[in-house]
Image: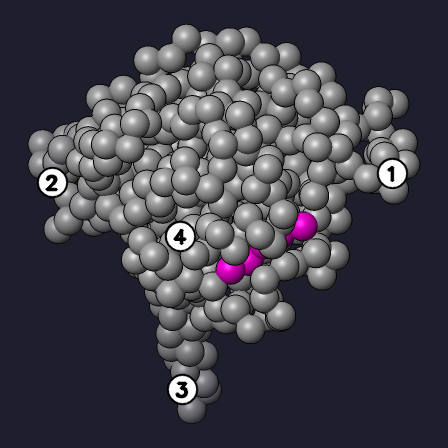
Amino acid sequence: MSSNSSESEKVQFDEIKGKKLPQKFNYLKDKVAIVKVDDYQPENIKNALKSIFELLEIKDFFNKKSILLKPNALAPSKNAMTPPELITELIKFLKNETNTKEIVVGDSTFTKTITSLTFKRSKIKEKCEELGSKTINFFESERIKIKLDNPPHEIEEYIYLPKEIYDADLIINLPKLKTHEGYVYTGAIKNLFGLLANKMRMHMTHKDKTDFQRMLADIYFAVEETNDKNVPKVFTIMDAVMAMEGKGPRAGKPKKIGLMIAGFNPAAIDIVGYTLMNGNPSDLDVITSLANRTSLIIDINQLKILGIDNYEDFIVKDFKKPKIATVKKDRIPKEGLRSKISEKMTRISIKIKRKNCLLCEECVNHCPAEALERKNDKIIVDRGQCIECFCCGESCPNDAISAKFYLFRILPVILVILAIGTFALIWFLLQLITSFF
Ligand code: SF4
Ligand code: SF4
């Protein structure tokens, strides 16, 4: 498939560092299909997939392609992961309705063992195998070193991708719309982090949250570097039927939005996703980094939304987002007192809820900064070491870890000090007044 002539002309103006942006990034880049889905009943998912393919007119796109499905397989709970029903219905749909060559499913979470267990306990492995599709644990994959060239990298010049990603003709990215207590939001772009095996190193190398989020966008461009066609290699179908609010990405609460969101530019999908969470997409570096490099305007009103009349009807006004900062680094003063105060105000603090803690030490094992330690029957956080990545919360099986603004944690102390100060002042003034009489 090729873009029409007006798109080709536009390519000439989409230049970064003097290089023309490859044509593939313009393919349907601002089109997003949004379809209503009531629940995960197979029939409803099947109808939703049919609508997505019809709205975007992409049925032929999948012909003779080797396809890799990339779900979010964080933990074996329907609330935290891409529902197995969506994965299996998509495999059936592709097999029955399109002429695909091969379909496989791949992901990696914290470790090789945890990834295998998640595939097993969620029954993804069993169900996919029944349909003739194998599951791939990316921790077992051979790695191919990819150099980011056009558009150029922002953070990581080289990304090591699983060979299966390199070999596939098309990646269908299957994120779930969720909050994230470390980065506020996780969606289409962040889901590609599961392609990397060196996640702990990435967290430690890019402690700065802006850099980390830009690195996530680099992963997307690395995948597209493996594609020499004029059409993109990544297609996203986001599950927002039951989103997650509050303490995401693992221990949050389900929140019904009742939609599936699909398209080729992952930034466009995340613009829609974060808007539905009643957030401002321009606040998130992960979105701005990818959108800027694909010349996509970060404004939902500039997207061509297909399938629903008015996206505003679906914005969840009371969506509970994590109480952490979305303030972007470039908006924080670089030096002086204001810089110090801003830095303190935007820090998050990790808290362990002792009554929920099983002392399993998953968090200790998965903290890239070695900021957690078990001391007798307690998990202790070294706040000086913490890089605020929230890997601990993602790995905790029993909702025992939360993140909050550092300011919120110390607020009670500040209030007590203020109350004591006020009381002391009043007492002093009363003493002064009575000494005159
Ligand atoms: S992962 Fe959760 S339950 Fe396990 S030790 Fe850490 S805080 Fe406790
Ligand atoms: S304590 Fe948690 S948030 Fe802090 S560095 Fe370790 S894993 Fe990341």
- Label 3: how many Cα within 10 Å (few below 14, some 14–19, many 20+): few
- The percent position of residue 360, horizontal first and vertical second, equals 13, 33
Q: Is mark 2 within 8 Å of ligand 1?
A: yes
Q: Which mark is residue 358?
A: 2
Which mark lies nearer to you, 4 or 3?
4
Mark nearer the viewer, 4 or 2: 4
**Residue under label 3:** 434
- Of mark 3 and mark 1, the one earlier in the sequence is 1
Label 3 close to label 1 by CB (< 8 Å): no
Residue 67 x/y as whole percent: 47, 27
Q: Give the quarter of the figure containing the N terminus.
A: top right
Please give the residue where the numbered disc 1 appears in the rendered image.
5
Q: State which tag comes first along the sequence, 2 or 1.
A: 1
What's the residue at 46%, 42% (across, down)?
Answer: 97
Q: Regarding mark 4 in the picture, which secondary structure is present there?
A: helix
Instruction: Name the residue at 49% across, 45% down.
Output: 237
Can you identify the residue that label 4 sits on?
46
